[in-house]
Amino acid sequence: MTPDANLAAPQPHAPAESQDTAPGYAAAQAAYDAAQQDTTMVQCLAPDGSVVREDLLPDPATRLELYRQMRRARHFDERGWVLYRQGRLGVFPPFGGMEASQVGTAAALTKDDWLFPTYRDTGAALTLGLPIARTLAYWRTSPHGWHMPADLKVLPFYIPIATQYPQAVGAALAERRQGTRNVAMAFIGDGGSSEGDFHEALNFAGALNAPCVFILQNNGWAISVPTRAQTRATDLSRRADGYGIPGVRVDGNDALATYHVTREAVERARSGGGPTLIETVTYRVKPHTVADDPSRYRSEADTAGWDAKDPVTRLRTHLLNAGLLTEDSEADLLAEIAAEFEAALAEADSYPEPTPAEILDHVFAEPTPQLQKQRAEILAEHAAQDQKEQA
């Protein structure tokens, strides 16, 4: 089944008047606000861009690069909406508002490391180096986007929930067996952290001390279900305690804090210190997918308070105040990002239309006898159809 088919399938929604809709959203926002005062949640920048932890500030070049990657990710997300409405992109899950959570984590990796993204982690994949044209092809369900570049260890975006977690542990253990210092990073959402694979992976990684970093993006929603409706836990990072591994809670709308804690976890994994679970506390301000109707389970008024917590605005304000960014330099940056995207879009548009048999080309490195038989059947049916149309 194609990614579009999975994501576009009807999703269960609670009725608008349910006790778990608007109150659930308000409760999640209140929980985020309360976490600002929680000393266990790591934070470098306050929502207004002011510095609360000088010791966590990375060097100026890193701060500027994080901002550039966040702007690239947001531009992709915003243009993706337009392309979808134009019929030039399939159903895809927007991630606007979660840029700090994705960029701040993926930026701690190198291209020798593994990235296991969920379907919402396009921003993380772009940060590590996945080409924009290849990403556009993927969300068009084109075979040109089904295989990753040979020099990049990024897995295709996972549609099943939580299956990537134990697979990431396997990749991490394979790297260790080969004698490398490479790590594996896997993403999941708050809803996915209730899946069995999540817990099995943490136990698996802890028991074998795998060089793995688990990112748990607590964005407040599992499709239409607020976090408080699927778990009574209020600090998901503490789930690491049950498996004897470190758990860290970080402000997921703060790119600098997210980068700091992730870099520490990555270095700990590289040095043989084992896995870490990082809960990034953020919020899904956008719908579940571009085909979702969030008004069925929340109101527009419920999202209003999140504008003040916007991660891109937060880092931008800090950079302007620190003199690292100016209005002119930002204008140049945005123009560069827009040009990069349009060039990638033109490349994606130039890809030839796939043939029916290409659906089988990237299932296995070596086609099985069954796949070879299916391919022959598809080619025969296609040839017969062509002859019929030409007759």
Image: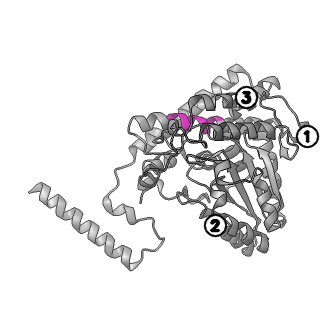
* Tag shown at residue 55: 1
Residue type pointed to by label 2: Asp
Judging from the image, what secondary structure is the residue with disc 1 in? helix
- The front one of 330 and 258 is 258
Point 50% across, 40% down: residue: 344
The residue labelled by disc 3 is 316
Give the Cα separation between the discs numbered 1 and 2.
Answer: 36 Å
Q: Quadrant of the N terminus?
A: bottom left
For the C terminus, give its image quadrant: bottom left
Disc 3 versus disc 2: distance between alpha carbons? 37 Å
Q: How is the image coloured?
A: one colour
Does the magenta stretch mainly form a helix, a strand or a loop?
helix
Which of the numbered marks, if any, corresponds to residue 197?
Answer: 2
Residue 86 vertical position relative to residue 147 in the rendered view, above or below: above
Looking at the image, which is closer to me, 352 or 312?
Answer: 312
Residue 72 falls within the magenta-colored stretch: yes
Determine the secondary structure under disc 3: helix
Helix, strand or loop at label 2? It is helix
Occupied quadrant, residue 387: bottom left
Question: Residue 262: percent from the left, percent from the top?
Answer: 78, 51
Residue 300 in percent (x, y) is at 57, 30
Q: Is residue 314 above or below residue 195?
A: above
Q: Earlier in the sequence, mark 1 or mark 2?
A: 1
User: Residue 243, percent across and down?
Assistant: 79, 67
Q: Residues within 10 Å of mark 1 (few under 14, many from 20)?
A: few
Which amino acid type corresponds to the residue marked 3 in the rendered image?
Answer: Arg
| Residue in view at x 78 percent, y 69 percent | 206
